[in-house]
Each structure stands twice: as C-alpha cells, then as structure tokens.
Image (cartoon, helix red, strand yellow):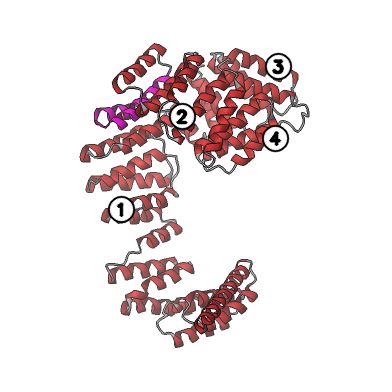
C-alpha cells in the first residue's frame, strides 16, 4: 500500500513539474521574461544538472538586461559543476551583450581550450557558440572536436553554419564530403541543399553546385555525383540532362531502372514528351520485368495520345499490348486508359462504358474497384448521365473516405454538382476537401470553391455562373463550338460580372483548340487590359507569348510578353520558363 501511495505521489510531483515547465516556456515565448525567470529559477535550483533550465534562466536574465545576475548564476554553476565548460561561452557572450567584446574573447578561448582536454564537451561548446550566433567560433569547436575524436560527426552542424553565414560553396562542399565518405547521407543532404536551390539554372547557388559536382565527377567518378547532377537538373526542369546522368549510372551499375522511370514520369508531367519517350524506350530496351514493361508501355501510350498521334496508330498500340499481355489485372491500368481513349478520343462512350463494366467483373481489390468506378463515372458525366455518375462517385467516396481515390471521388461529386448548377452542395463537398492529404486535390477544390464564391456575390440568381458552368461542362465533353458560343452569351450579357475574366480565358483556350488563334490572341489581350492585378493575368500573358511563338510566328511580340512576366510578375509560376524562352529567343547562350 505504501509503495502505491509513493508511486502516486511521484507521478503527481512529475505532473506538477511538467506543468511548471510548460508554463515557464509559454511565458518565455510570449516575452514575459520576468514571469518565466521566476519559474525557471525554482526549477533550476531543484535540478542544477538540467542544462535546459539553466540556459533558459540565463536567456531570461540577459533579455531583461540583468547581466550581473546572469553572470553570478553561471559562476555558481561552474563552481558546483565544473564539467559544464560550455558556460564559458555564455559568460563571454554576456560580456558582448554589454559591448565588452575584448573581455569576452578570453572566455571563448577558455571554452575552446577545454575541448583539447575533454573532447566529449565539444558538441555542447559548439552548440552554445552556434546558439549565440558566434558562428566562426562554433566552426572551430566542431572541427576541433572531430579532429580529436574521429568517431564524432558534426558535419551537418558545420554545413548549417556555412549556410547561415551565406557561405554556400563551403556548405555544399561539406555535404558532398559527407556523401563521399558515406552515400547513405545522400537523401538528407538533398533535403538540406534543396532549400538553397531554385528551378533557375542560372541561379548562383545552382551554378555553384553544378561546378562542384562536375569537378568531383572528373576527379573521382562516383554514381553519387551523377545522381546529384540528375537531381539538380530535375529541379531546373532540364530533363534531357537528367536522363543522361541517370543513363550513365545505369551503364555503370545496371541494377535499377527506377531513376530513369522517375525522370520519364516527371518529364511527361511537365509535357517534355520527347525526353519522356526516350526514357521509357530505354527502359523497354533494358528490362525483362513484365511490370516494368507495362509501366513503360502505358507512358508511351499516354505520350502518343497527348502528341496528336493518329487514332488508328494508337489503337494498334493498345491491341498489340493486349495480344502480348492479355486483359487481366496485370494490364488493368492499360485497359482503363484504353476505355478513356475510346470515350474521349474516339468519341465512343458507350463502348468505353461497356469496357469498364467488364473490367469491374475482374477480382479487383477495393482500391482498384474504386479507381475503375471513378473512371466509369467520368465517362457517364461525359454523356450527361449525372445521376448514375453520382451514384458511382458516392460509392467510391464512402468506401475509401481517407484514401486519395475517395477524395478524388468527392471532388468529382462537387464538380458534377457544379456542372448541374447545385452550387451549395458543391461547396459543401469542396470545404471538406480543402484539407485533403493530396495537394493537387486540395488545390483543385480550393480553386473551384473560390470560383463559385467569387461569382455568386453580385449575382443572386447565379445566372452568369450557371452559364459558365455549362460552358465548362461542354468543354469537358469536347463540344468546343457550343462551349465557345455559351461563353459568348456570358460575355455579351454580363459585361460587368466578375466572371468575365474566367469566361475570356476559357474561351481563349477553346479558340486555341479549334485553331482560331487570332481570336485567342484578342481574348488574352482583353484579360490583360481588364485588370493587370487579376489572378489570371500572368496565365494570359504566358499563353499569349506561347501563342506568338508557336502559332502566330511573331517572335518580337513573344519576347515582349515573356519579358513582361519576368519584370512585372516575378512570383508567377511561369517565371522560370518565361526567362528561359526569353533568353533563347533573344539569342543568349543559356548553357
């Protein structure tokens, strides 16, 4: 019984200490340093070995400019616990705060000299220097400790200090030294280095890392340098260069094609179809794994469909795959893609629906079932069978609520309701999705929700928004002429409505699809003229520049609009591409 009572008392005491610690920290964070100091003082006196309490109490005194009190506390600690030599750093910094810099130096040297006698304190000394922004001293402390104790590794701290000092080449070199010793550091090093890079190949940090990697690759060829160069080129959207590096690694090792598949995937997603095609053809040439082959063939099919290849040629590609691999679960993704091709490219939705219903009879797991049902519902929307589509979407959403497939289905429910003009129900679904684990779904949900919200305020009857939603549905159904005409009704009858810019933009993209390039140009110019701060303006400017280059053969105007992105919209997602294309058209040597 006594033991139980003793345990209860100990637990209660620990709970009180934890609450006091939390309260003190909250006061500290809120800038209430006197209150924080009063609690930390009690905690520190009871727990003199707890360096956290001591450090927070010192910080409180220094922030209150009670430097003598802080000094007494530090000397008292050193008298009680001489092994806390890191406090010499704090004593020196306490003097610096009083502008007695010269007097501080002997304390810093004393802390560094203590490492010679006892290397085990090197980390605490280095960390204290670092915490007080005495970065050069921190570097000395960490490096000295590593020299005295070869098993110590403070390279991450050293690299972080170089980064804080804006000495980026030395920071990169530190990470590269670590990788040279142990390739296991590669993923962590990428994470840290990535925060200093951009997608601009001419960014000084990108250029610096590239030079360092090329130099190491020449002096000491290693797969790591090729992998890092590939990673750097991917950040810069230079997919061909990334492919070349990964190919070099594969030729040397011949073990893993996944990096080349990844380059191909990223190139495809960024519409660099030539590089993507090269990647997946290379994969096919170098694998006997059926799953890998099917992945590569699926991407090659997608590239053909996105590259305006003849429909008969694409159909032949599909049938060749089905003859070779069959129509089992192994080829599920290709079968679903074929159904989409039949519906959206060949305009045979009934046949596509029949194919998907046949696939649903295969022994699918719940995720495969949800995936196929979602695709089936997409085609049902394409054919105006909204009620049946909503049944399928709802089944998927209910069975896979927390999975990305289920969240996609919920977004499709919202989108279908939007097409039908049921804006309240659409928004109720979209609000749930704003915290989706998928960034893409979350962004799509936010975008559609904003579109509805922004365009119902001045239109209580929501007639203009309904017309615009109908036009979007018609565009989804590839009824481009009807969509263009519907948007024109919006533009003619609701000239003061906030949806005009969206209508102009959607109509412009449809004009491009139907080869009405001059009309597309007119629309983009109208958006720019309408409101230079509108959210769609940088999209319109970029699309206009692309139009001049690719369709209207007017390089001079393209240069003007690419340049406009660079100087007027520096936060635009099109900035890097605009800069590259601007320099290329101007004849700069961007390599």
Residue behind mark 4: 453
Label 4, label 3: how many angstroms apart (C-alpha)?
21 Å
Sequence order check, earlier mark of 2 and 3: 3
Q: Residues within 10 Å of mark 1 (few under 14, many from 20)?
A: few
Mark linked to residue 184: 1
Residue behind mark 3: 489
Q: Residues within 10 Å of mark 2 (few under 14, many from 20)?
A: many
Q: Nearer the viewer, mark 2 or mark 3?
A: 3
Determine whether, in the image, residue 407 is placed left or right of residue 272: right
> Quick one: SS at disc 3?
helix
Label 3, label 1: how many angstroms apart (C-alpha)?
61 Å
| Pointers 2 and 3 in contact (C-beta within 8 Å) | no
Residue behind mark 2: 581
> Quick one: SS at disc 1?
helix
Seen at 39% across and 33% down, the residue is 265
User: In this rendering, is residue 579 above or below 555?
Assistant: below
Sequence order check, earlier mark of 4 and 3: 4
Q: Nearer the viewer, residue 324 or 79?
A: 324
Label 4, label 2: how many angstroms apart (C-alpha)?
36 Å
Sequence order check, earlier mark of 4 and 2: 4
Residue 365 percent coordinates (x, y):
43, 35
Q: Residues within 10 Å of mark 3 (few under 14, many from 20)?
A: some
| Pointers 3 and 1 in contact (C-beta within 8 Å) | no
Q: Nearer the viewer, residue 100 or 422?
A: 422
Which range of residues does the magenta coloring cover?
Answer: 280-307
Label 4, label 1: how many angstroms apart (C-alpha)?
49 Å
Sequence order check, earlier mark of 3 and 1: 1
């Amino acid at each position: 019984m006594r033991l139980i009572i003793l345990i209860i008392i100990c637990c209660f005491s620990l709970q009180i200490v934890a609450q006091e610690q939390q309260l003190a920290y909250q006061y500290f964070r809120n800038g209430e340093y006197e209150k924080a100091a009063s609690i930390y003082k009690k905690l520190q006196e009871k727990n003199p070995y707890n360096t956290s309490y001591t450090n927070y109490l010192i910080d409180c005194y220094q922030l209150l400019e009670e430097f003598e009190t802080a000094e007494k506390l530090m000397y008292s600690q050193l008298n009680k616990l001489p092994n806390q030599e890191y406090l010499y750093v704090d004593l020196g910094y306490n003097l610096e705060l009083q502008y007695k810099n010269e007097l501080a130096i002997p304390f810093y040297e004393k802390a560094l000299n203590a490492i010679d006698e006892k290397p085990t304190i090197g980390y605490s000394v280095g960390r204290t220097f670092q915490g007080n922004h005495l970065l050069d001293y921190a570097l000395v402390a960490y490096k000295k400790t590593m020299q005295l104790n070869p098993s110590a590794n403070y390279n991450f701290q050293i690299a972080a200090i170089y980064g804080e000092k804006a000495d980026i080449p030395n920071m990169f070199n530190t990470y590269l030294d670590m990788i040279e010793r142990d390739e296991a550091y590669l993923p962590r090093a990428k994470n840290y280095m990535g925060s200093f890079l951009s997608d601009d190949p001419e960014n000084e940090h990108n250029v610096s890392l590239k030079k360092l990697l090329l130099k190491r690759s020449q002096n000491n060829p290693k797969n790591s340098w090729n992998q890092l160069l590939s990673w750097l080129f991917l950040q810069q959207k230079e997919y061909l260069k990334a492919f070349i590096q990964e190919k070099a690694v594969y030729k040397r090792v011949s073990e893993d094609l996944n990096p080349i598949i990844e380059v191909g995937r990223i190139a495809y997603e960024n519409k660099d179809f030539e590089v993507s095609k090269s990647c997946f053809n290379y994969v096919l040439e170098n694998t006997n794994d059926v799953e890998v082959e099917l992945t590569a063939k699926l991407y090659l099919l997608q590239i053909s469909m996105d590259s305006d290849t003849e429909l008969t040629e694409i159909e032949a590609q599909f049938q060749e795959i089905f003859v070779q691999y069959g129509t089992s679960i192994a080829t599920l993704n290709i079968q679903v893609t074929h159904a989409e091709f039949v519906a959206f490219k060949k305009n045979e939705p009934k046949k596509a629906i029949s194919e998907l219903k046949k696939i649903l009879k295969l022994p699918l797991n719940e995720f495969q079932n949800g995936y196929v049902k979602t695709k089936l519902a997409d085609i049902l929307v394409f054919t105006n069978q909204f009620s049946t589509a909503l049944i399928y979407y709802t089944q998927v959403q209910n069975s896979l609520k927390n999975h990305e497939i289920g969240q996609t289905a919920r977004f499709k429910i919202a989108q279908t309701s939007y097409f039908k003009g049921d804006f309240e129900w659409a928004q109720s679904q979209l609000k749930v999705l704003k915290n989706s684990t998928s960034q893409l779904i979350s962004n799509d949900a936010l975008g559609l929700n904003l579109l509805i919200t922004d365009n119902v305020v001045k239109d209580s009857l929501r007639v203009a928004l309904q017309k615009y939603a109908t036009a979007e549905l018609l565009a989804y159904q590839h009824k481009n002429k009807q969509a263009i005409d519907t948007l024109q009704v919006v533009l003619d009858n609701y000239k003061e409505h906030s949806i005009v810019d969206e209508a102009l933009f959607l109509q412009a993209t449809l004009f491009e699809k139907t080869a009405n390039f001059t009309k597309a140009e007119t629309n983009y110019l109208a958006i720019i003229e309408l409101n230079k701060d509108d959210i769609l303006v940088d999209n319109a400017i970029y699309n206009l520049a692309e139009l001049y280059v690719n369709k209207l053969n007017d390089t001079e105007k393209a240069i003007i609009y690419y340049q406009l992105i660079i100087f007027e919209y520096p936060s635009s997602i099109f900035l890097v591409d605009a800069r590259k294309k601007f320099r290329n058209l101007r004849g700069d040597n961007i390599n």
